[in-house]
Image (spheres, rainbow, N blue to C red):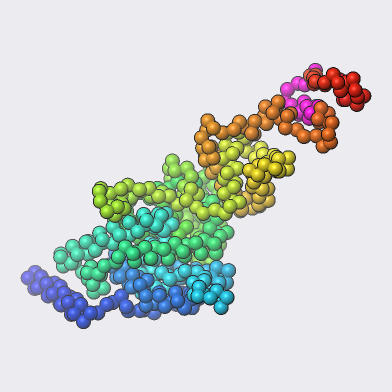
């Protein structure tokens, strides 16, 4: 026992001496560059020269090396995930639509044109552990806003350095890079740049994989799963990160998996990998995504039994952010990755507005399409009223989309229907159908095709209304007022 203790003590002393020597020589391991995995080679070639240089020798590379070295002792081995992610990133970067090249016409901004994959290439040239750290950056960027994500990063890094220092004090095993990482600093500004690049990549990848991404969001956006790992921010983030990596590695290798909490679904949307999914709802549904990067058999099963009360959000995550502000106690924040935090086009946004407009009309589902036709007709009748015309354009867009896009628009429309207060407080909203259910208002809104036909136009409308009314109108009479001067001065004043 004494000999073993001496050996451990000697090893620790030697490591300290090595570290001190390196520090004396002003050695910085963050400047080292490793060969990127072969799956990432074409990705690096697709980047602009400015971004590639920054990723290989700039601040982004240094941050990748620091974070990769800091967490390397605590990360699972996920070769299938690392390989598949590199192939997907390269696929996106090689697309001219997703990653256009800068030309002379772009002037001094030529190197800034195209996809920002700086953190991916910085991670790929810093080791597989740094790639895992980039994956965490995508998860955090997907669900937290930038200020919140930086606070999470700051506390997460600080706490991990404390844990590593404690391990060193107890003479536990470690890598040299880990030992060095405990003495280096990652500034808040560097973490902000790391986060910004990950967010930029998410926007590019979301657009490139738009169809598959929408299919995935249609499945998971209304599940309302919660990421619930106790033990404070550090434990919650570390568990969610490693759990998602191990689960995705298993799925990609062809093993089936049942979702038990939200971190895996968050990873799916952030990493742009699409396993087949078995959805166990009221009516079971198997969604075949046919992603070639996922081996056959890699099926993810989700179901209603996991649903929480977060009706409009795919995943929600609550954390106490000690670094949210400089003074005071930790602030509890909750973030969601569902439709409420999604970016939508203007036509899609207007469909949400339409949903809010009709939210108090008590419409059955079978009448939605008829309601869209009503908006189109109102836009024609009241073309001089700009806001009605805008709703008419939105209804035309709603009716024009088909297939998967139709499912997505229905989801956005229903999101608005669940929010009647979106446009105005409930007590300040106009009457249903803008008051046109009031027969007096409706009749006064009718415009004859020719002057002098106002009475005839209204009578024709009332006759048509009587023919489709659910009430018995066979004995009904239509009464109307004709001025005496018209009766005396004209023979075509209309029926009496």
92 shown above or below 268: below
Q: Going 58% across and 52% down the picture, which residue do you hit?
A: 346
Q: Could you tell whether 307 is left or right of 32 in the image?
A: right
- Confirm whether residue 359 shows in the render: yes
**Residue closest to the eye, 490 or 198:** 490
- Confirm whether residue 93 shows in the render: no
Q: In which quarter of the image is residue 190?
A: bottom left
Q: Going 31% across and 62% down the picture, which residue do you hit?
A: 188
Q: How many labels does the image show?
A: 0
103 shown above or below 182: below
Q: Going 50% across and 73% down the picture, which residue do you hit?
A: 109
The single residue placed furthest to the left in the displayed view is: 2
**Residue closest to the eye, 61 or 384:** 384
Q: Quadrant of residue 153?
A: bottom left
Q: Give the range drawn in magenta.
A: 458-475
Q: Position of residue 197 (x, y in %)?
A: 42, 66
Name the quadrant of the N terminus. Answer: bottom left
Q: Could you tell whether 385 is left or right of 61 in the image?
A: right
Q: Where is residue 455 in the image (x, y as percent from the top left)?
A: 81, 27
Q: Quadrant of residue 387?
A: top right
282 shown above or below 215: above
The single residue placed furthest to the right in the displayed view is: 491
Name the quadrant of the C terminus. Answer: top right
Q: Could you tell whether 443 is left or right of 421 in the image?
A: right
Assess whether residue 471 is covered by the magenta stretch: yes
Q: Going 27% across and 53% down the picture, which residue do you hit?
A: 326
Assess whether residue 252 is covered by the magenta stretch: no
Main secondary structure found in the magenta portion = helix
Q: Where is residue 49 in the image (x, y as percent from the top left)?
A: 47, 78
């Amino acid at each position: 026992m004494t000999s073993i203790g001496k050996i451990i003590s000697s090893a620790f002393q030697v490591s300290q001496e090595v570290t001190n020597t390196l520090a004396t020589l002003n050695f910085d391991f963050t400047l080292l560059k490793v060969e990127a995995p072969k799956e990432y080679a074409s990705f690096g070639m697709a980047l602009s020269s400015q971004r590639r240089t920054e990723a290989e020798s700039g601040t982004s590379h240094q941050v990748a090396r620091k974070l990769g070295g800091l967490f390397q002792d605590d990360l699972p081995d996920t070769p299938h995930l690392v390989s598949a992610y590199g192939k997907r990133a390269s696929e996106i970067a090689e697309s001219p639509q997703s990653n256009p090249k800068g030309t002379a016409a772009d002037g001094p901004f030529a190197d800034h044109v195209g996809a920002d994959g700086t953190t991916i290439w910085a991670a790929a040239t810093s080791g597989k552990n740094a790639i895992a750290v980039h994956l965490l950056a995508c998860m955090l960027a997907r669900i937290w806003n930038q200020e919140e994500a930086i606070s999470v990063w700051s506390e997460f890094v600080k706490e991990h350095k404390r844990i590593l220092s404690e391990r060193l004090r107890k003479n536990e095993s470690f890598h040299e890079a880990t030992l060095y990482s405990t003495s280096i600093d990652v500034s808040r500004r560097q973490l902000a740049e790391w986060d910004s690049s990950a967010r930029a990549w998410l926007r590019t990848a979301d657009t490139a994989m738009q169809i598959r991404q929408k299919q995935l969001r249609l499945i998971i956006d209304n599940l309302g799963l919660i990421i619930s790992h106790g033990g404070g921010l550090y434990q919650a983030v570390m568990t969610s990160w490693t759990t998602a990596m191990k689960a995705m590695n298993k799925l990609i290798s062809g093993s089936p998996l049942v979702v038990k909490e939200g971190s895996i679904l968050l990873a799916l949307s952030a990493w742009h990998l699409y396993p087949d999914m078995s959805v166990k709802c009221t009516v079971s549904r198997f969604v075949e995504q046919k992603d070639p990067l996922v081996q056959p058999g890699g099926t993810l099963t989700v179901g209603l039994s996991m649903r929480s009360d977060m009706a409009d959000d795919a995943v929600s995550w609550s954390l106490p952010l000690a670094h949210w502000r400089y003074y005071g106690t930790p602030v509890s924040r909750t973030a969601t990755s569902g439709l409420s935090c999604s970016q939508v086009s203007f036509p899609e946004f207007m469909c949400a507005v339409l949903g809010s407009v009709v939210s108090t009309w008590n419409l059955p589902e079978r009448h939605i399409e008829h309601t869209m036709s009503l908006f189109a007709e109102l836009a024609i009748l009241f073309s001089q009223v700009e806001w009605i015309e805008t709703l008419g354009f939105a209804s035309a867009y709603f009716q024009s989309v088909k297939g998967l896009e139709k499912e997505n628009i229905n989801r956005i429309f229903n999101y608005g229907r669940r929010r009647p207060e979106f446009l105005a407080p409930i007590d300040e909203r106009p009457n249903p159908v803008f008051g046109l259910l009031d027969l007096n208002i409706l009749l006064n809104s009718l415009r004859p095709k020719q002057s002098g036909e106002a009475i005839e136009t209204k009578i024709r409308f009332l006759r048509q209304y009587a023919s489709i009314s659910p009430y018995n109108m066979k004995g009904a009479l239509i009464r109307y007022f004709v001025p005496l001067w018209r009766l005396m001065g004209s023979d075509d004043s209309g029926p009496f």
